[in-house]
Amino acid sequence: MKTLLALLVTMTALSAQAWLKSHYGKLKNRGSTYTCTLTNKTNDTLDMKYVVFSFETLSGESAPYDVQNRIDKRVRSGESITASVNETYAYKANVCKFLAR
């Protein structure tokens, strides 16, 4: 019974992440700081949960990776949201997206 309950809780947590919609932002960098900005062009309020920056190495020697930060902000129609992350000069962000309910 405990195993079944643990399995159910795990499946629920994983499926909650799958329900999030991706909204791709505009990526800018200044030195090692990357900034992602998104303007809500929908007619709905977006409940933003995470921002994700996808990084790759400049040399191509390592595998690409993502940096995901929890933000928990609501963005009304017409409003903008901005999030930033710092990374070393050996890596370059190529995409950023906000995940919302």
Image: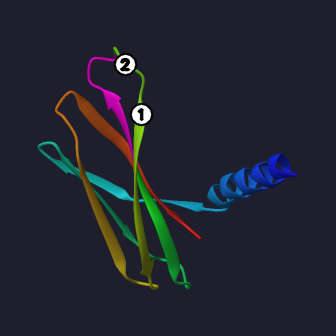
Q: Is residue 69 left or right of residue 92?
A: right
Query: Residues under labels 1 and 2: Cα distance?
Result: 9 Å
Q: Amino acid at mark 2?
A: Ser
Residue lying furthest front = 2
The reply to whether callout 1 and callout 2 are in contact (CB within 8 Å) is: yes
Coordinates of residue 75 in the picture (x, y in percent): 43, 80
The picture quadrant where one finds residue 44 is bottom right
Which residue position is annotated with label 1? 65
For numbered disc 2, what is the local secondary structure? loop
Q: Give the label on residue 23, or none.
A: none
Q: Does residue 38 show up magenta in the picture? A: no
What segment is highlighted magenta in the picture? 53-60
Q: Nearer the viewer, residue 76 or 66?
A: 66
Query: Image point 34% across, 57% down: which residue?
Result: 26
Q: Is residue 66 left or right of residue 21?
A: left
Quadrant the C terminus occupies = bottom right
Q: Does residue 58 show up magenta in the picture? A: yes
The picture quadrant where one finds residue 81 is bottom left
Relative to 91, does residue 94 appear above or below in the rendering?
below
Relative to 60, does residue 20 appear above or below in the rendering?
below
Q: Nearer the viewer, residue 39 or 81?
A: 81
Which residue position is annotated with label 2? 62
Coordinates of residue 92 in the picture (x, y in percent): 27, 35
